[in-house]
Each structure stands twice: as C-alpha cells, then as structure tokens.
Image (tube, rainbow, N blue to C red):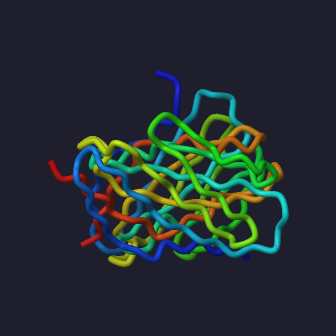
C-alpha cells in the first residue's frame, strides 16, 4: 500500500515571499503520478499541479513548481510570490498508473499568507 | 456548469437516522469515488466505482453502502448514522487517464 506523509501541519509566509511545502511518499511502484491539491476556505478541492514519475523534468504552473526527487520519494511544492489568495490547506496525493487506481492523500498542511 | 454535483451541501442527522448523499457528474467519466475528510486525517477513500456496474471498498467502508445507479450517478448511503460519521464528504470522478480527479463541492454532515 502507498502512504503519503506531510509532516508539517501548518506554515506561514509573508505576502510576495516564497514558501516550500514538503511531501514524502512510500511506494514500490515505478510508474505513478503525484499531485498537489489546494483547498481554500470555500472547501472546493482544486488541482494545483501534477507530476508524472517517468518525467525527470519538474512540473511548473505559473507561480507553482515542484521539486520531484524520485529516488528520495520526495515531492515538494514551491509557491513563488505568495498571494493572500494562496491561503488554504494543501494536500499532496499519489496515484498509481492504471484505470483502476485511486488517489491516496496526505494529511494536509494549512498555509497562511500574511499581508 | 459541467462538473460534479453533490447534494445536499449541509445536513444534520440524529444518531440512528439514515440518509443518502447524492452525486452526479456530466463529464462522461468512468470512475467515481467517495471520500471523507476529517481534521488532521486528510481525505480517506470510503468506496469507489471503477466503471458502471462495479463498486469496491476503500480504506474506511464500515457503516456505508454505495450504489452506482448509472454512469452519471454514484450515491453514498448511511443506514444508521453514528457520531463518528460526522465529517465532510466529497464525491469525485475521473476519466480513465491519470490526470486526477474532479471533485464536488462537498457535504458537511453532522450526526448528533
């Protein structure tokens, strides 16, 4: 079974600064996908970024980028130029390849952006 | 708007009451899922349906039943609600590729 660990329950960052959220995972699979989801106070789950394990290049989406270290089973999210709207809970998630696969989530981290 | 629709958004039940959470998606997705979210626990899979006509247990299925009524709809039933089932419930769907899920807006359920 796969496990996803987010060891920091809370973080805080000043507006316009950069913050990195940590995530590690455990799996025996070689092919899989990793995700970061954002959950603002509205409760909606929003996909932030996705990484395919077979790709060495780190995924980037505007101000969001990841540092994917496959050997270390690490998948951190970097938010650049933090904005007040980035205040949310962030979940790291893992999914094997295949039609019958499911997302396994970490426990989440609450990020607060200070004005 | 295309997406995943969950009803109701909020519900209060008394211990022992039953209810069904409804979920429908209009994206022609094959797979559908029910998760519960509890503080400090992340999202945990209750049941899922890989395709129409099939359902399987997830990590925390006890106390729940599901029905995949057709390709669009996947309902979650609590037969005899317990306070331990107080949670936020999310329905999600996915195509057969690995892009990830589309989530509904969630149902906050309180059992008193």
Frontmost residue, A74 versus B101: A74
Image x and y of residue A112, in percent = 25, 57
Q: Give me the residue at 78% from left, 41% from top.
A: B96
Taking the view exactly as shown, the residue that stands out farthest to the top is: B1
Could you tell me which quadrant the N terminus of chain A lies in? bottom right
Looking at the image, residue B48 sits to the left or right of residue A112; the answer is: right
Looking at the image, residue A88 sits to the left or right of residue A63; the answer is: left
Looking at the image, residue A84 sits to the left or right of residue A52; the answer is: left
The quarter of the picture where residue B40 lies is bottom left
Taking the view exactly as shown, the residue that stands out farthest to the left is: A115
Frontmost residue, B80 versus A63: A63
Image x and y of residue A5, in percent = 54, 74
Q: Give me the residue at 63% from left, 52% from top.
A: B67
Q: Give me the residue at 76% from left, 55% from top.
A: A53
Taking the view exactly as shown, the residue that stands out farthest to the front is: A17
Frontmost residue, B103 versus B14: B103
Image x and y of residue A56, in percent = 76, 51
Looking at the image, residue A80 sits to the left or right of residue B97; the answer is: left
Q: Give me the residue at 51% from left, 59% from top.
A: B77
Q: How many marks?
A: 0
* B111 relative to A94, above or below: below
* A22 relative to B102, above or below: below
Image x and y of residue B15, in percent = 31, 74
């Amino acid at each position: 079974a796969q496990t996803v660990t987010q060891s920091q329950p809370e973080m805080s960052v000043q507006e316009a600064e950069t913050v990195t959220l940590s995530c590690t995972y455990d799996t025996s699979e070689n092919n899989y996908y990793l995700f970061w989801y954002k959950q603002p106070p509205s409760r909606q789950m929003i996909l932030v970024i996705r990484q395919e394990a077979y790709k060495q290049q780190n995924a980037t989406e505007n101000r969001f980028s990841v540092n994917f270290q496959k050997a270390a089973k690490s998948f951190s999210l970097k938010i650049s130029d933090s904005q007040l709207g980035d205040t949310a809970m962030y979940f790291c998630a893992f999914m094997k390849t295949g039609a019958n696969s499911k997302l396994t989530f970490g426990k989440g981290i609450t990020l607060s952006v200070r004005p | 708007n295309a997406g995943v629709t969950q009803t109701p958004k909020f519900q209060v039940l008394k211990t022992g009451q039953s209810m069904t959470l409804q979920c429908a998606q209009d994206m022609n997705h094959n797979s559908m899922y029910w998760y519960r979210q509890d503080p400090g626990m992340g999202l945990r899979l209750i049941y899922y349906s890989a395709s129409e006509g099939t359902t399987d247990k997830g990590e925390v299925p006890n106390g729940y039943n599901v029905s995949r009524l057709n390709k669009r709809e996947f309902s979650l039933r609590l037969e005899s609600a317990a306070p331990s089932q107080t949670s936020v419930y999310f329905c999600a769907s996915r195509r057969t590729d690995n892009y990830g899920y589309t989530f509904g807006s969630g149902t906050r359920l309180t059992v008193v």
